[in-house]
Image (tube, rainbow, N blue to C red):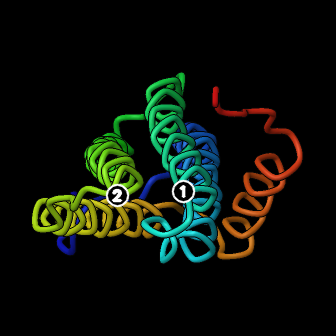
Amino acid sequence: MGLFGSPKIGGKELQECLAYFEAQTRVVTFQSREADLYNNAMVKYGNSINENPSAAREACKATVRLTQSADEVLRRHQGISHVPAAASAMHYAWYVGFNAYRTWALATSKAIEAMAQGMQPHTGYLQQLVGEYEKAWRDAQDEDKKFVRRLRTTGEELAKIVARATAIDATGDAWEPQL
């Protein structure tokens, strides 16, 4: 450990860490894509849930997909085959973030279902879960940044890794929810 924080990562460990970073980036990219789909559905249908049965059905389908994708995010995160010791803090932080996301997604799904049935959900609890999820997510992103700073690689190399991970997710991901 150096005077100014964690030591830089190099050699064989660097290659392992770069492979891990790419795998983790694929998980985050998948989660972001699914979150965007949910957000788009809520923009389209969210304000009409109480008045429009069709909008309520679509919003409920979107939340079912959201919860299933949150489960899939955790499965993919836990399925990363090798987590180098240098990435363990980041890996754990993302695990906490993904778990908080899943908890929020499940509660949100129940709230949307309640709204679709004409009930009023407990929004205070949802707000609490949003706060917990957002904090856990920021913590994971902070750990991610610390980890990346320790890598002995260029911004160009990291950009290539992110581009590869994003391209794989966009073109080669056949995951579909069970609706």
Query: Which residue in the structure is indicated by mark 2?
Result: 115
Q: Residue 112 placed where, x, y %?
A: 38, 54
Q: Is residue 42 left or right of residue 8?
A: right
Image quadrant where one finds the N terminus: bottom left
Residue 48 vs 32, above or below: the answer is: below
- Contact? badges 2 and 1 (CB < 8 Å): yes
Q: Mark 2 belongs to which amino acid?
A: Met
Question: On the image, which quarter does residue 164 sit in?
Answer: bottom right
The kind of secondary structure element at disc 2 is helix
Residue 79 vs 133, above or below: the answer is: above
Residue 90: tell me if it is visible: no
Q: How many labels, in total?
A: 2
Residue 32 vs 76, above or below: the answer is: below
Q: Residue 53 placed where, x, y %?
A: 56, 56
Q: Residue at x 26, y 49 (%)?
A: 100
Indicate which disc residue 59 carries. 1
Question: On the image, which quarter does residue 15 sit in?
Answer: top right
Q: Residue 57 placed where, x, y %?
A: 58, 50
Image quadrant where one finds the C terminus: top right
Q: CA distance from mark 2 to mark 1?
A: 10 Å
Q: Residue at x 65, y 76 (%)?
A: 155
Q: Residue at x 54, y 22 (%)?
A: 81
The outermost residue toward the right is 171
Identify the mark nearer the N-term, 2 or 1. Answer: 1
Q: Residues within 10 Å of mark 2 (few under 14, many from 20)?
A: some
Q: Residue 130 placed where, x, y %?
A: 24, 65
Q: Mark 1 belongs to which amino acid?
A: Ala
Residue 17: tell me if it is visible: yes
Q: Is residue 152 left or right of residue 135?
A: right
Question: Which of the pair 85/92 is nearer the observer?
Answer: 92
Q: Residues within 10 Å of mark 1 (few under 14, many from 20)?
A: many
